[in-house]
């Protein structure tokens, strides 16, 4: 099965001034497209793997796949999956979910404390990767970062919120000012 680049539910300029249209366009049409194409290329070798990429990622270690292809899928399938999710947590209207805010308040004490902890994890992440709010298999929430295109799915966790810390997500507008990008990202986060 061939997967396609998902269409965004908003225009590339809808998140301005926080995320600029040029970065959004390149991020989506070039970077995410490349992950999609390379994931498809590796999956074409394994026509029996018909489950969704998210399901395959969750059981990556047990897939009947050459080790080199497993690595390609982890990187490019991860890029495909993570970016699909990233676009969904962004929203020009920035409308929080009352249910999620309640869960966050229970897990972290307050929304402000959650934001502080999440921002600290993002600012403390070295190099490229992601920061996540994820739900564990037993139902708790936790914040952590992953390198490269690794996903919480690899750990059996369900992603709730993610922040892309690869330079392609922010460099045109923010250059080396990643903390400013992180602060502004909160302005367009949809609390799903």
Image: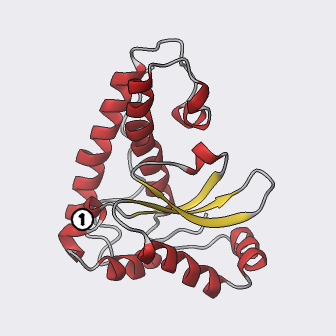
Report the number of discs: 1
Q: Is 105 placed above or below 32 here?
A: below
The residue beneath circle 1 is 21
Q: Is 47 placed above or below 18 here?
A: above
Q: Locate residue 37 relative to residue 136 in the image: left or right.
A: left
Q: Position of residue 154 (x, y in %)?
A: 58, 43
Identity of the residue furthest to the front in this view: 67
Q: Position of residue 188 (x, y in %)?
A: 44, 73
Q: How is the image coloured?
A: secondary structure
Q: Pointer 1: residues within 10 angstroms few (<14), some, or many (20+)? A: some
Which image quadrant: the N terminus? top left
* Depth order, front residue of 11/53: 53
Which image quadrant: the C terminus? bottom right
Q: Locate residue 12 relative to residue 129 in the image: left or right.
A: left
Q: Locate residue 152 relative to residue 18 in the image: left or right.
A: right
Q: Is 128 placed above or below 5 here?
A: below
Q: Is 9 placed above or below 63 here?
A: below
* Depth order, front residue of 23/127: 127
Q: Position of residue 90 (x, y in %)?
A: 46, 64
Badge 1 element? helix
Res. 2 visible in picture: no
The quarter of the picture where residue 116 lies is: bottom right
Res. 10 visible in picture: yes
* Residue at image coords 36%, 81%: 179
* Residue at image coords 46%, 49%: 82
Q: Position of residue 68 (x, y in %)?
A: 38, 26
């Amino acid at each position: 099965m061939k997967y396609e680049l998902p269409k965004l539910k908003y225009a590339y300029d809808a998140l301005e001034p926080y995320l600029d249209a040029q970065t959004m366009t390149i991020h989506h049409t070039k970077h995410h497209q490349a992950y999609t194409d390379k994931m498809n290329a590796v999956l074409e070798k394994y026509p029996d793997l018909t489950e969704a990429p998210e399901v395959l990622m969750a059981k990556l270690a047990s897939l009947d796949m050459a080790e080199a292809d497993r690595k390609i899928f982890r990187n490019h399938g991860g890029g495909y999956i993570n970016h699909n999710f990233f676009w969904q947590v962004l929203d020009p209207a920035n409308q929080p979910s009352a249910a999620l805010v309640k869960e966050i308040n229970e897990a972290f004490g307050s929304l402000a404390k959650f934001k502080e902890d999440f921002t600290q994890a993002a600012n403390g992440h070295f190099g490229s990767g992601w920061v996540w709010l994820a739900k564990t298999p037993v139902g708790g929430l936790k914040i952590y970062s992953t390198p490269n295109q690794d996903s919480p799915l690899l750990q059996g966790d369900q992603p709730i919120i993610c922040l892309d810390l690869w330079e392609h997500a922010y460099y045109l507008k923010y250059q080396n000012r990643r903390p400013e990008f992180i602060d502004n990202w909160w302005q367009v986060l949809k609390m799903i």
